Image: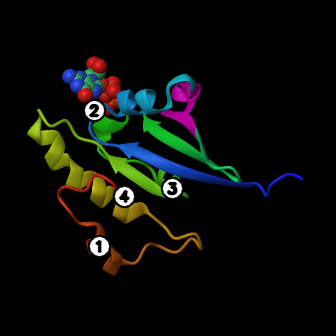
Amino acid sequence: MQAPHREHLYKLLVIGDLGVGKTSIIKRYVHQNFSSHYRATIGVDFALKVLHWDPETVVRLQLWDIAGQERFGNMTRVYYREAMGAFIVFDVTRPATFEAVAKWKNDLDSKLSLPNGKPKMAHNHHHHRNDNNMFV
Ligand SMILES: Nc1nc2c(ncn2[C@@H]2O[C@H](COP(=O)(O)OP(=O)(O)O)[C@@H](O)[C@H]2O)c(=O)[nH]1
Ligand SMILES: [Mg+2]
């Protein structure tokens, strides 16, 4: 008899300034599954990492990489929609890219919404404020 099978799909964003290594991190993590199909059309690369969490559970991580839109310092609400988490990446050798982390975090906070479509409540914001915290 087959064990019960669960699948979870999580959308994760990888954001941060241009050239900090976002694409490299995703390629390194996902490797063979990297796909650049969407670059031309929506300016977003999309990679899928499949984790066999336990014998009954498969976790699929959809890693969203931005391609060329970093220079605007913000993304559209559509890009952030239904994301479960985000990595904000910076380059330790370029302080300006670290200062930009706060800007990216503000952009996230201003556009995130709850599953019911309502805006994320303002009083939640400070829970994630941590200068060393790249995972929000
Ligand atoms: N020295 C060094 N170079 C890196 C590292 N990660 C990425 N790079 C280089 O930095 C450049 C920008 O990386 P990329 O992943 O395209 O950055 P993105 O614009 O944030 O996607 C590329 O030339 C990479 O090879 C790293 O950890 N160390
Ligand atoms: Mg890139």
**How far is mark 4 from mark 3, CA to CA?**
10 Å
Residues in magenta?
33-49
Q: Of tags 3 and 1, which is closer to the observer? A: 1
Q: Which residue is mark 3?
A: 83
Q: CA distance from mark 1 to mark 4?
A: 14 Å
Three-letter amino acid code at disc 3?
Ala
Q: Residue at x 32, y 80 (%)?
A: 123
Residue 128 rendering spot, x and y as whole percentages: 29, 67
Give the spatial CA distance, label 2 vs label 3: 21 Å
| Residue 62 drawn above or below residue 40 | below
Label 1 to label 2, Cα distance in Å?
A: 27 Å
Q: Amino acid at mark 1?
A: His
Residue at label 4? 108
Under mark 2, the amino acid is Leu
Q: Secondary structure at mark 3?
A: loop
Label disc, if present, on residue 127 of the rendered structure: 1
Q: Which residue is mark 2?
A: 18
* Residue 57, percent from left and from top: 67, 53
Kindly state the secondary structure of the residue where label 2 is placed. loop
Q: Give the Cα distance between marks 3 and 1.
A: 18 Å
Q: Is mark 2 within 8 Å of ligand 1?
A: yes
Q: Nearer the viewer, residue 4 or 90?
A: 4
